Amino acid sequence: MLEIRNVVKTFGRDVTAVDGVSLSLRAGVVGLIGHNGAGKTTLMQMIATLTRPTSGEIVFQGADIVARPDAIRRRLGYLPQDFGVYPNLTALEFMQYFAALKGVRDPARIRHLLELVNLHEHARRPASAFSGGMRRRLGIAQALLADPDILIVDEPTAGLDPEERLRFRNLLSELGFDKLVIMSTHIVSDVESIAGQLAIMRSGKLVAFETPAAILDKARGQVWSASVGTADYDALRASVHVLHAQRQGETMAVRIAHAGSPCAGASLAEPSLEEALMAQRYAVREAA
Ligand SMILES: Nc1ncnc2c1ncn2[C@@H]1O[C@H](COP(=O)(O)OP(=O)(O)OP(=O)(O)O)[C@@H](O)[C@H]1O
């Protein structure tokens, strides 16, 4: 559906925000993971044709969207990181406003979308009084107005409470049945249960594009758990890559990424996805 070929985006002479990224994407949820500044927003803005690549190609259903941005604009919904609502509009008015902008004339579509995001009972309330989660769901509803094939959501779960997070995740998961949903985050748990594929970015580069299961598989045999005395912890930390440490009285319960046994008494552990990614990052750093 969407081919990203060797895309580069530089700002001025010194900043390479996206550094030669290639990706081939189909319907489903893709989690775009990376630290702040990794290049996630810049990559998504290029797909959304809000900014142009410095070089490289982005092809949607056979059309080069850099040369022909209209090819994708009508087929794409975008929820930016700093999505805001207008203070004086109700949720319904907000949707009517965006429907008019996008040329969507069917009032039933607005009702359907407000139901889909579970805001229909709040349609006549000012959107400015909504919680963060409700605003984001309204943002998704406006992004879906023209029934896009691609939905891009930039850090949508920031600031949401756990219940809102869950509801939002489920909504994106359902949308991924027949759309390409690209969701950026730096919180691994937000995407691990819903993303079919994870694209991991670091310093503008794509360092992995794999299923969560493949990432976990690679880390098996490299994540260890151990219990060490607090007096020995500093020496351990200086010599191996500690993923997590928790003080338990006079000992520290530690999880470690290491190719072989990192210390006496360590046992192999089943990695979480976050640990698997951290273990991989470590391997990349060592190899560099
Ligand atoms: N308009 C711009 N001018 C100059 N530098 C920019 C511009 N936009 C982004 N950058 C730089 O490009 C790099 C990538 O930024 P980007 O916002 O794409 O990262 P990100 O992964 O989305 O981070 P975050 O999670 O903080 O949004 C950063 O170093 C950023 O400072």
Image (tube, helix red, strand yellow):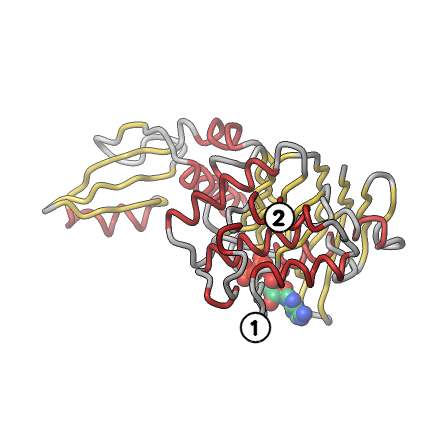
Q: Nearer the viewer, residue 62 or 216?
A: 62
The image shows residue 24, relative to residue 73, as above or below, that is above
Direction from residue 80 to residue 156 in the image, left or right = left
Name the residue nearer the viewer: 233 or 31.
31
Left or right: residue 117 versus residue 164 is right
Report the residue that reaches farthest toward the left.
250
Please tell me which residue is depicted at 85% across the width and 49% down the height of the picture.
Answer: 71
On screen, 77 above or below 274? below
Label 1: which residue? Answer: 88
Splitting the image into four quadrants, where does ligand 1 fall? bottom right
Q: Position of residue 225 (x, y in %)?
A: 28, 34
Q: CA distance from mark 2 to mark 1?
A: 20 Å
The residue under the point 57% across, 39% down is: 198
Name the kind of residue labelled 2 in the image. Answer: Arg
Q: Secondary structure at mark 2?
A: helix
Disc 1 marks a residue whose amino acid type is Asn
Q: Residues within 10 Å of mark 2 (few under 14, many from 20)?
A: some
Mark 1 residue element: loop
In the image: residue 81, left or right of residue 186: right
The front one of 237 and 71 is: 71
The residue that appears at 73% across and 70% down in the rendered structure is 13
Answer whether residue 37 is visible to the viewer in this image. Answer: no
Res. 88 in view: yes
Residue 115 place in picture, x, y as percent: 56, 45
In this picture, residue 203 sits left or right of residue 22: left
Q: Along the polypeptide, which appears first: circle 2 or circle 1?
A: 1
Residue 111, disc? 2
